[in-house]
Image (tube, grey):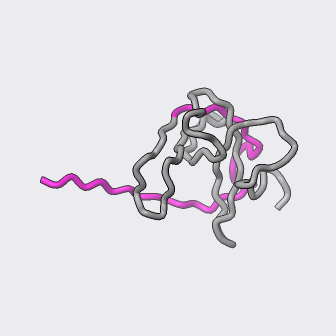
Amino acid sequence: MKLITVTIALVVAMTSERLPSAQARTPVYSYTVVHRPQQPAFTVPYIVVIALLEEGWHMLSNLIDCDPADVAIGMPIEVVFREMSDAITLPYFRPQASRSEPQASEVHEAGGER
């Protein structure tokens, strides 16, 4: 008997106007570090988090700009958006920090100018 694992990814185009509390600063509810890529296009390791948003619902996304050894349950994170194409912008999370300069991976912060 052969075990087959199928992963289905649903990509939804989101903008800061559609994400509740677009300036969300939220804790990590749960996470995993992926060491085995699903496809050759994935660079490993990468961190997948479940964030507990202020509205009370959970959101699954990647945690960027963070070393896998530094992620922890309860760690404060904030939402950022990356333009994947002209039609698709995806929400990601990064560690919350008080800083004045944006990080290289950031397209714009939630609620920021486009």
From this view, report whether residue 87 is shown above or below residue 100. below
Instruction: Using residue 98 as the reference point, say whether residue 40 is left or right of it.
Output: left
Residue 40 quadrant: bottom left
From this view, report whether residue 93 is shown above or below residue 52. below
Q: Give percent across and percent down for residue 42.
A: 48, 59
From this view, report whether residue 45 is shown above or below residue 89. above
Residue sitting at the far top: 74
Q: Does residue 26 belong to the magenta stretch?
A: yes
The residue positioned 52% from the left and 44% from the top of the image is 48
Instruction: Using residue 111 as the reference point, say whether residue 54 is left or right of it.
Output: left
Dominant secondary structure of the residues highlighted in magenta in the image: loop
The residue positioned 64% from the left and 37% from the top of the image is 53
The residue positioned 57% from the left and 48% from the top of the image is 62
* Quarter of the figure with the C terminus: bottom right
Q: Give percent across and percent down for residue 65.
A: 66, 45
Residue sitting at the far left: 1
Q: Does residue 101 belong to the magenta stretch?
A: no
Residue 73 quadrant: top right
Q: Is residue 54 visible?
A: no
Q: Give percent across and percent down for residue 22.
A: 74, 46
Marks counted in the figure total 0
Q: Is residue 23 visible?
A: yes
The residue positioned 85% from the left and 47% from the top of the image is 101
From this view, report whether residue 43 is shown above or below residue 94. below
Q: Nearer the viewer, residue 24 or 107?
A: 107
Instruction: Using residue 9 as the reference point, say whether residue 69 is left or right of it.
Output: right
Q: Nearer the viewer, residue 30 or 102?
A: 102
Residue range corresponding to the magenta coloring: 1-30
Q: Nearer the viewer, residue 53 or 109?
A: 109
Q: Nearer the viewer, residue 7 or 95?
A: 95
Q: Give percent across and percent down for residue 70.
A: 60, 33
